[in-house]
Image: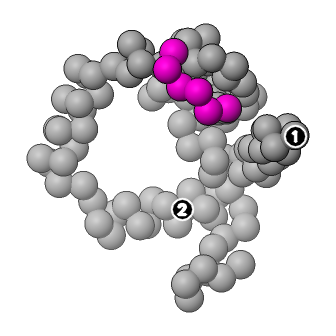
Amino acid sequence: MRVRGTSVPSSPRGRLSGATEARRARPPTLWGYASQLLAGAGWTSRPWLGRIAAPTLVLAGDRDPIVPPRNARILARHIPSARLELVAGAGHLLLLDQADRCAALIADFLDHDSN
């Protein structure tokens, strides 16, 4: 597959390697990283989740060490009519780790939402 003149690897290992190379080519600044950590530690969307009216798919890896699956369960429980999908064996990079499975889940969600 070609995207803007760049070759996109077809294997999960190749995609992960490409993502790692891209991150090393332009690493985050210390200020940016620290700000992201501070924002994540002190902010919550929990009070507003019940106001989401759009059909919502909560997709997460069941082995995510960064954002544990319990977070996805909380989101799905508090968003009206949310659908929760935990991808077995996937971690934080579930869209890279299990791209085909994630694509199938997203397509199924979109197909059922449009009916």
Residue 39 visible in this rendered orientation of the protein: yes
- Mark 1 or 2: in front is 1
Tell me if residue 21 comes above or below residue 32 in the rendering: below
Asked if the magenta segment contains residue 4, the reply would be: no
Q: Nearer the viewer, residue 29 or 45?
A: 45
Q: Are marks 1 and 2 in contact (CB under 8 Å)?
A: no
**Residues rendered magenta in the picture:** 50-55
Residue at left offset 42%, top offset 19%:
48
According to the image, label 2 marks what residue? 17
Q: Amino acid at mark 1?
A: Asn
> Can residue 60 be spotted in the picture?
no
Q: Which mark is residue 60?
A: none
Q: Residue at x 23, y 20 (%)?
A: 42
- Badge 2: how crowded within 10 Å, few (<14), some, or many (20+)? few
Along the line of sight, the residue nearer the viewer: 64 or 113: 113
Quarter of the image with the C terminus is top right
The picture places residue 55, in percent across and down from the top left corner, at 67, 32
Q: Secondary structure at mark 1?
A: loop
**Distance from the alpha carbon under mark 1 to that under mark 2:** 38 Å
**In the image, residue 2 above or below residue 101:** below
Q: Secondary structure at mark 2?
A: helix
Judged by its main secondary structure, the magenta piece is: loop
- Mark 1 sits on what residue? 115
